[in-house]
Amino acid sequence: MSNTPQAPAARHFRTLFISDVHLGSKAAQAGLLVDFLRLHDAETIYLVGDIVDGWRLKRSWHWPQSHNDVVQKLLRKARKGSRIVYIPGNHDEFLRDFPGEHFGGVEVKLNDVHETADGRRFLVIHGDEFDIVVRNARVIAYLGDWAYDMAIAINLVFNRVRRRLGFSYWSFSSWAKLKVKNAVNFIGAFETALAEEAQRQGCDGVICGHIHHAVMNERSGIEYVNTGDWVESCTAVAERHDGSFELIRWAEVLAERKVVAPRNGWSKADAENTVEAA
């Protein structure tokens, strides 16, 4: 019997929800997402907006191999039978001109209503339509985007130092954002607005992205699910085959595997190499 360590087996879900990857941005954690997609599969995969960052690509072109790998990984899943639904956000709004079109097996929809295995209905929408800043003041939104770029740049340097010291990934920018009272108030208002829209459309809940804050909670009897992002938190939401949801924090999973690796058959070196490759 061989004692050779084996990589973790792929997990299969009914549905995966991923948003705010921001391919084309230097801050995109594309390597981590490729690793996540390698180990997670689903019958349906929703791309809930801002997968490609058209705003940043207009300013300067940045498209390394890891970003192309994400696209190829998703297209490969489509060829193997997964249904891929792309719901554009504000950063990839150019795709909103193509509702109903299919590109390489990827279906573009402005929004969708997803029915879970247990019969609940969820409005799937990026969410920028309910961000007053983006909707009513695009110039302010661009200025905010520039400030966010600066915060992410600090985050990249911060985590480079952590990695050299042997520590796992931790989002300084996400932590700082949640310490700002106005940001916390905005998140609460955003969640309420999305929950009210889901209720107006006769849904039991809403699944969205946009604000880079992964969470699953309840607002006035409506289930609110935010998929987070692959810039700061590296999160996705999965629907299990019984209809229940799971919030996957991938960076935390990798960090945990570095500790428990001897017991689950994955070596510490494997985990460290996976994080370093990102």
Image: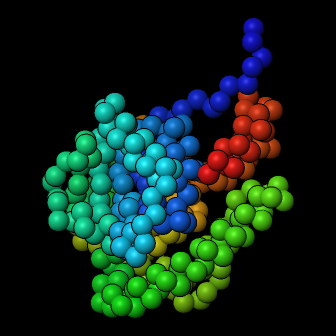
- Position in image of residue 172 (x %, y %): 68, 72
Q: Please, which colouring scheme is shown?
A: rainbow
Q: Is residue 71 left or right of residue 253?
A: left
Is residue 20 something that shows in the picture? no
Q: Is residue 6 above or below residue 132?
A: above
Q: Is residue 239 above or below residue 50?
A: above
Q: Is residue 246 above or below residue 193?
A: above
Residue ID at (32%, 66%): 92
Residue ID at (25%, 67%): 94
- Position in image of residue 98 (x %, y %): 17, 60
- Position in image of residue 173 (x %, y %): 63, 75
* Quadrant in which the N terminus is drawn: top right
Front residue (pair 57, 120): 57
Q: Is residue 70 left or right of residue 90?
A: right
Residue ID at (68%, 49%): 275
* Total tally of numbered discs in the picture: 0
- Position in image of residue 58 (x %, y %): 36, 73
Picture quadrant where residue 243 is located: top left
The residue at the far front in this view is 61
Is residue 137 something that shows in the picture? yes
Residue ID at (23%, 47%): 103
Front residue (pair 57, 52): 57
Q: Is residue 162 left or right of residue 201?
A: right
The residue at the far right in this view is 165
Picture quadrant where residue 239 is located: top left
